[in-house]
């Protein structure tokens, strides 16, 4: 995959910026204002400012179901999803209900055997555990057949989800999903773990008002905010104010060690000090290790790591997850090389003519296709869908392929797939997802027809200008704003994440020194063009390792503090380096 030229654009400032107060430094005010913050009050991230739960449609019915289950000591079974949001949602639901006195267990479908969500096949497996009530977390809004299968067996179903619904909702006893029609909940961006946190917090409040349940243990729902923060960041949902509150409160607890032994263990195996944890660490350090279980094996391993209260067991499970993540990286590298060969085989002209990129290889691993789709999308700045056999042992033309899609700004991926399905109802067996990511199933024999149909939709929705990646920055930083104290303030100023991005800056530098590390990374010494101030810098997985970098460049970077052998130094993390004449 060749280097893609990117457009550097500085974030616009509002015409009427508002006042954030004298306590916030000028450079930080610029960053907040460019992200839509208009008053200091919006930066208040205490729990008392969370969105009102009373506006969650279906919440009252859900609470009645759960109160009845607790009163009658019914058997509750949580059916989760096989990613980090699903794992944290499951762990939160199971541990909180058990703490409230409930009889609760969980079941997570193995993605390679059962696919996604509450399917009739999963219901059949769940029935062997004799549940009275099934609670779906981070799935279920599309499980029309699965819910019907459960009810046919006399099992009640509570659906908690955050994914966009289809044309038909399941006929469950209760549905809590801020994105279902008619729901007036203020935060439509809640992750699955955020939805179940709201449900169980409301349940706990309801228990306290029931005289006949006064004997049940009291629970502090704030103790579960570590799970909420992890699942929210790892699922890449937009960090609106409500999500920032949940993430910030969870991270504050993690930094003082008030979190699951499993999360502490996952940080330990990654050699990350929990006392200096940032929101980006949840996405890049903890999330991938947790996800590795669902991608390659069974997410039950990740859930057990989050459920255990034994630090030794947590460390043992975290090490297994770390080993799986290393294995996942190896598979990913091999698949990435295959993808590069496929794209190179198309020729430069044909590759550019593909606006929606679809790739398939019969040897690719179903659990890693989402990561590969992200890599291709980032590299080519085109919507990308990567397919692998649904059954690795099958290669016949009538067998099924699982696809994982990632989008770019301007194309709502689920809506695009919906348009393909309406025009070509024979192509998509099933699909679902978000604006930026989705999953689907197609027949192997239909791969080329689907790729053509998807490309046609992408061409209708996007313009040629959309295919040029734009790197948004927060402008320049003065040398005084690149001090250790300023960078520490910046790191703690978030939480940063999806649609509330971590600040990055751009400026002109002279490249004084450069050195390639491990054949992939570029170590640099940069001199600021105006002041001559020298800065250490590094670009991971650099496009410039195969040729010398330019002597003069515009650099997009994130300021960081590098700690090595007890010494702390300012370092620039380079996101993009553009040659200047």
Image: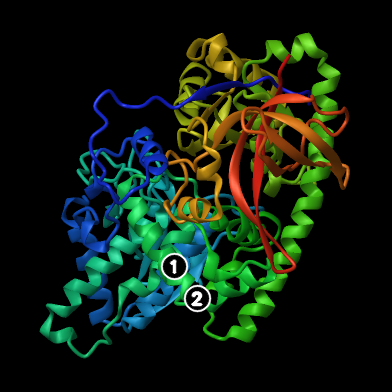
In which quarter of the view is residue 163 placed?
A: top left
Is residue 67 visible to the viewer in this orientation of the structure? yes
| Residue 449, placed above or below residue 207 | above
Q: Quadrant of the N terminus?
A: top right
Mark seen at residue 540 = none
Q: Is residue 185 left or right of residue 191?
A: left
Location of residue 572 in the rendering, given as x and y in whole percent from the top left corner: 65, 44
In which quarter of the view is residue 569 placed?
A: bottom right
Q: Nearer the viewer, residue 42 or 478?
A: 478
Q: Is residue 152 left or right of residue 554?
A: left
Q: Quadrant of the C terminus?
A: top right
Residue that mark 1 sits on: 226
Circle count: 2
Residue located at (76% from left, 32% from top):
511
The mark nearer the N terminus, 1 or 2, is: 1
Location of residue 471 in the rendering, given as x and y in whole percent from the top left corner: 56, 27
Q: Nearer the viewer, residue 432 or 316?
A: 316
Location of residue 577 in the rendering, given as x and y in whole percent from the top left corner: 70, 29
Give yes or no for contact between labels 1 and 2 (Cβ–Cβ under 8 Å): yes
Q: Nearer the viewer, residue 243 or 86?
A: 243
Secondary-structure class at tag 1: helix
Q: Is residue 536 left or right of residue 227?
A: right
Residue that mark 2 sits on: 260
Q: Nearer the viewer, residue 559 or 177?
A: 559
Q: Is residue 229 left or right of residue 62?
A: right
Residue located at (17% from left, 87% from top):
214
């Amino acid at each position: 995959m060749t280097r893609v030229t990117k457009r550097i654009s500085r974030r616009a400032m509002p015409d009427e910026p508002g006042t954030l107060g004298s306590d916030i430094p000028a450079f930080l005010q610029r960053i907040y204002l460019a992200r839509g913050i208009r008053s200091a009050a919006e930066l208040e991230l205490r729990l008392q400012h969370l969105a009102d739960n009373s506006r969650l449609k279906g919440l009252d019915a859900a609470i009645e179901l759960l109160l009845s289950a607790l009163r009658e000591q019914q058997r509750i079974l949580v059916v989760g999803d096989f990613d980090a949001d699903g794992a944290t949602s499951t762990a939160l639901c199971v541990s909180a209900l058990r703490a409230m006195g409930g009889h609760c267990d969980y079941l997570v479908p193995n993605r390679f055997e059962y696919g996604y969500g509450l399917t009739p096949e999963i219901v059949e497996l769940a029935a062997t555990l004799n549940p009275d009530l099934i609670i779906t977390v981070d799935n279920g809004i599309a499980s029309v057949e699965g819910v019907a299968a459960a009810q046919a067996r006399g099992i009640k179903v509570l659906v908690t989800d955050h994914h966009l619904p289809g044309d038909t909702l399941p006929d469950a006893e209760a549905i809590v999903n801020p994105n279902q029609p008619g729901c007036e909940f203020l935060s439509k961006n809640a992750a699955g773990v955020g939805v179940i946190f709201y449900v169980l917090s409301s349940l706990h409040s309801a228990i306290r008002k029931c005289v006949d349940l006064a004997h049940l243990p009291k629970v502090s729902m704030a103790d579960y905010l570590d799970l909420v923060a992890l699942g929210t960041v790892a699922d890449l949902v937009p960090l609106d104010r409500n999500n920032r509150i949940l993430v910030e409160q969870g991270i504050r607890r993690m930094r003082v060690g008030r979190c699951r032994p499993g999360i502490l263990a996952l940080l330990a195996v990654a050699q990350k000090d929990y006392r200096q944890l940032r929101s980006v660490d949840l996405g890049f350090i903890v999330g991938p290790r947790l996800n590795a279980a669902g991608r390659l094996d069974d997410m039950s391993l990740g859930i057990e790591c989050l459920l255990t209260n034994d630090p030794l067991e947590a460390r043992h499970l975290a090490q297994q997850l770390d080993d799986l993540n290393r294995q996942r990286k190896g598979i990913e590298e091999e698949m990435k090389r295959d993808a590069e060969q496929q794209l190179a085989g198309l020729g430069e002209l044909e590759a550019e003519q593909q606006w929606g990129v679809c790739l398939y290889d019969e040897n690719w691993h179903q659990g890693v296709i989402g990561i590969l789709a992200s890599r291709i999308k980032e590299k080519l700045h085109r919507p990308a869908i990567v397919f692998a056999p649904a059954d690795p042992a099958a290669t016949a033309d009538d067998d099924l392929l699982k696809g994982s899609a990632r989008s770019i700004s301007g194309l709502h991926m689920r809506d695009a797939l919906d348009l393909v399905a309406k025009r070509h109802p024979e192509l998509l067996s099933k699909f679902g997802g978000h604006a930026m990511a989705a999953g689907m199933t197609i027949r192997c024999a239909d791969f080329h027809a689907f790729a053509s149909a998807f490309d046609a939709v992408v061409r209708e929705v996007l313009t040629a200008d959309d295919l040029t990646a734009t790197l948004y920055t927060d402008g320049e930083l003065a040398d005084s704003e690149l001090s250790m104290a300023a960078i520490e303030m910046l790191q703690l100023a978030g939480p940063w994440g999806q649609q509330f991005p971590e600040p990055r800056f751009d400026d002109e530098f002279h490249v004084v020194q450069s050195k390639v590390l491990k054949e992939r990374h570029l170590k640099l010494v940069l001199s600021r063009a105006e002041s001559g101030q020298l800065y250490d810098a590094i670009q991971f997985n650099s496009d410039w390792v195969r040729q010398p970098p330019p002597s003069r460049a515009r650099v997009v970077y994130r300021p960081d503090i590098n700690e090595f052998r007890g010494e702390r130094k300012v370092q620039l993390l380079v996101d993009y380096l553009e040659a200047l004449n």
